[in-house]
Amino acid sequence: MKKIIVIFIIFLVNFIYCQNNVNDLPQNLINDAEGIILNQKETVNVISKDEVNGTYELEYAVLKNCNPDLNKLLIPYDKFSKIEKIEVQIKDKNGKILKTLKRKDFRDLGYDEFITDYRILTYTIYSPIVPLYVNFKYKYQQKQTFNLPKFRPILCESFSVLNSEFIINNYDTLNSIKIPENQWGKPKIEKLDKLIKYSYLVSNISTNETKKADLKNYKYTIRPFLTFFQMDGQDGNFSSWSSFGQWISNLNEGKDELDEKAKQEILSQVQSIDDNNLKIQKLYNYLQNKSRYVSIQLGIGGYQPFNAQYVHENSFGDCKALSNYMKAILSVIGINSYYVLIKAGDSKIELEDDFVQNVFNHAILAVPNGTDTIFLECTASNNIVGYQGSFTGNRKGLLIDGVNSRLIKTKKYGYEENLISNKYSIKINEEGESIINQTQLLKGIGIEYNNWLHFKSIPEKIFLDSLTKLGFNDIQDLKILSIQDFPQFIYPSKEIKFEYKSSRKIYKSGSRIFIDLDIENFPTEFNRTKLKEDNFFTIDPGYTILDEFEIPIPKNCILEKLPDNFEFKNDLGSVNFIGKKNNNIISINRKLVLKEGLYNHLPVNEIDNYFKQAINFKKVKISLICN
Amino acid sequence: MKQVFIILILNISIISDGFCQTYKFGKVSKELLEMKECPFENGAPAMFTISYGEYKSQFFKSEGFVQSFEIKKQIKVFDNKAKSVGTYEYYYYSPEKRSNETKIIKTKGIIYNLIDGNIIETKLPKENIYDEQLTDNLKKLTINFPKVTENSVLEFDIIIQSSIFYYNDWHIQEIFPIAINEFNIIYPDFFNLRFNTLGGIAPAEFNEKKRTETILFGNEKLDIDYKNNYFRFENVKSYQKESFCANESDYFAKIENQLISIKFPNGRFEAISTDYNTFTKKYLEYDNLGKILEQKDCIFESNNLLDTIKINKAKEIYKRYQTDIKWNEKKSITCDIKNKKLLKNGTGNIGEINLNYIACLNQNGIKSFPLLLSTRGNGTPHPFYPSPESFNYFVAISYIDGQYYFSDASSQLPFGYIPSNAINGKGWLLDNQFQQWIPLNNKFNGQKIQQSQITYQNNKLLYNIIEINKEYSAFNLLDILNKKGESELLKNLRSDKYNIDTIYIVKKDNISLKTNTIYSEQIKDETMILLNPFIDPPFKNNPFNANTRKANIDFPYLQSFSYVVFLELNENFDYETPENININAADDKLKFNYNANIDEANHKISITVQLKVLEQTFLAEQYEEIKKFFEDVVNKFNEPLVLKKK
């Protein structure tokens, strides 16, 4: 996954609260809790648009001998921030200090995954003693206001919360603070002598509630923004999407220039092509072949792309650099395109037209195409042109176009467009030995089935091994006969032809030959959706699976058992199975539809019923009797 | 990783020479750029044409002896899939506090591309080189080559110089094939270095040279002898992963460089590593290892212990350590704190917990020793030449009433067990008198017993399943239960099993877990029903799918599975059961028995299945047989009962 790394300047501490005795705490906060946040308090002082300081303090009790996550104290920092006065006290239930920590006790780690100036101070507490009390505090300063510290009242699902308090003191009173809608409501706002104070106080949250909370959802984090901000000397503002986009435009200005030699090279790629769509396709493939993804996030470079000329010469870059380069490439042939900032990945954020915020972690390119838009993922060397999958699809992004910058919606593929279609031709001899030929057509997010996009970038030998293990159940001698992309821009598809054997799925026992039709696994999404059931039951994305089997009955064998046709349908989707025998050939058609949507209204047994039927859909078995 | 922290006051000069006839560093031919396929491995997306590593020592008047390590690689890209070779990351030892002692003195790279028939060379720009302090002791050098594309050839030359002597293993094998792999090491004769070539790839050439050089040390002339060991490997195929392989690093071909000892010219001798006898003696003399065992300040005095029977006493001490001290997840096998401090801290690494625990056992009259281990994945220690880095864990071994008992006070396992990832071949008993290899394989078991009652009512099959997991089959489950609670365990057991109606824990103790699960399955009113008697078989798919095998097959522990199914039907059906089979494989160390019986009078079917893995490690040569065995097992567990309506 290619991401802009958003700077998380976090948590800071000031003073130590009185020791709370666990016995004095409300019973509902202790029941089933592995620990309790006694006091979490962060105070952010916004002095001016280039100066912020603050304190973070966290006092918690570990009640059970577990939860290493919360026992890992983390303080990220970067070249714009400075961490001071770290103090940690670890105490037993009598308030006796077991250990004190200072900055020197923390490990100072760089990021291993990419080149960056972000670092983390970290210390992990291990202790068998419960209850165990931890007081953690530090101060910080930062020289930018593009990213203000964020605050999470609930830190983990197994810890209840007695008090979590977040205060923002804005001394730059002409410069307003904005806080997006979140789970914790609106802040209390007080106009004081020289400042405006925004505060949240969250109290008494039991683990019944913390366990239901979807903590990965942005709504559980308070994320303040300063309207007029500065980053590395560059002024910008969040007054409107247009003004924020203007700031990005300014950062990008002049970055898309290419020299004459580069332009000639690009022109030579498309000199014999007239059709604009084909030109886009050709140049997208040119980008994919020429460049590779390398993540380098240094200073404001976390938000600003490399020069297109640099990318052209070096043939690498991150999402910003590659998108900006592709924009420059298209510009050479007179095709206008737009750099788009987006929040990529599973955790989507509903952006509102009237609330401007920086939540983006990725950049793509939008190319207007008549009434539609082609979105180009410039970091993926294997994407089919125009394919917009689950990583960036079906959400709003910020199209960067100077003062005309605006929110746009990316492509959504529905369950009918997300297709996994398989045609199996199974040849069996009397001994039960088989050869299976399979043609798989993948459309929409179906293209991501079995991580095809990922696999395509690894050596074929490893790919075949991975596919044998992950995609299929018990097959041998897998050969890929062909892979073909159908780049139809908005609705691209892919066709793969396989040949393999399976002495497990088709096997002889005595005079019987059994044929198991669960040759391929369900898409990984099938399991993922089920996992969400505890909190809210969402199917996203939906999809359709079509399977067709053609199985000639071997000589000297007869069909003994072909399951009856069946059909099931409810709000989630449908499952169908039709089998027949004609001219000694068994033909099977089956179809599974799982519709995207939020299904909290459905009774659990309805949901379970669908999944039970879906499993029946897969595990169908046929038997033949042979002489 | 081999290291010794010394600054030597001596000198050496080095001659290193070139590469082979086919590929030359610094000279890339048009033929190489036009090459479309690795000549000895079809389908490889890239090939190292040259991989060269060299350790050498140099004398500087101001610094004394310093060691330099040079890496030269030349890589040919065949396919766009391998463009990532353009980013090379090298991690090297450089403590932040001694940052001036290690420096990169050379980073050069060139990429060659064929453009319009011309070879175009592009130098690696300085701004594409990043050197970062990643952790307290580790730095990462990253170089990003420009213009990497299909058919590119790129090469780089890096030299890192340090007064900290540190010998990394040299990889003979990589994820891409290597045409020529050379390793050259030049070191003073007073260094006793040993080289182990692992992974079964023989060098095409090996030679050892000697030379003498006179250096001026102060006003005195000193003659220093140097050794030069040179290894050359040719056409090395890429490494391929395999399942059920306990120690992948054993099969990834490499040269282990082991510094055994240093005998300084002034007569001082420093043993770094040697044979197991000396190794043991030395370890037992270390303040932070052997000396901890001699302490007499055990916090659990005999008179405070409740039981006088030795085994019970040992268990009680073990329990107290488990309760009062938590493992901090660090695997260090040394110990800087004694018992009282350990108890006060309430936390410690493997060494701190287990060494103090062993000392305490001994103080209480229970003869116990440290057993040094290499965990699964860390490789197999050399049987004759010990290397400190090959051991990354240890447990206690106690001799009580004529029997050996294993225990690991840093774990939450019952007395007598060690973590499954520590069951890896043999462990070295660290004691001057009783030192020996103690086999660990085949000593630990995991058992699963499942009894199912299947009834048929109104086109519905009801499965009532009692399952007992014992020892290693239960430990993971018990760990979840203890750490995360019952609801989390049940959630785990339910995952992906949509047909479960109810599941609950019937009974648990510290080595077993008994659960009851009820499934139901609606079936159609058909004339013939294919009934699946095993909802949760031990292996859903054959774990051995590959056609060939290079590594030995390592099961984590001995395993036995017993399944009993009782099926109650009615007079409306005729029944057919699968054929009974009895398969033994791999010298009878794999056993499978499937026995189905029909009681026609009472309309009952019973099936008894036993699967036993009676050996932990099987040779790669037995792979075909093992693969076939598991295929038969999985097929049999998957085979339905045939019910036909009368």
Image (cartoon, coloured by chain):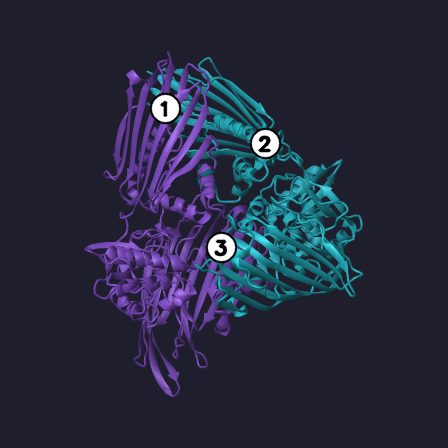
Chain colours: A cyan, B purple
- Residue A386 is left or right of residue B572, and the answer is right
In the depicted structure, whether residue B76 falls above or below residue B516 = below
Residue B129, position as x, y percentages in the image? 57, 63
Disc 1 secondary structure class: loop
Mark 3 surroundings: few (<14), some (14-19) or many (≥20) residues within 10 A: many
Mark 2 surroundings: few (<14), some (14-19) or many (≥20) residues within 10 A: many
Q: Is residue A437 visible?
A: yes
The answer to whether mark 1 and mark 3 are in CB contact below 8 A is no
What is the chain identity of the residue bearing mark 1? A
Frontmost residue, B368 versus A595: B368
Whichever of labels 3 and 2 marks the residue nearer the N terminus, that label is 3
In the depicted structure, whether residue A268 falls above or below residue A529 = below
Q: Residue furthest bottom?
A: B219
Q: Which residue position holds label 1?
A: A432
What is the quadrant of the C terminus of chain A in the image? top left
Q: Which residue position holds label 3?
A: A63
Is there one chain holding both mark 2 and mark 1?
yes
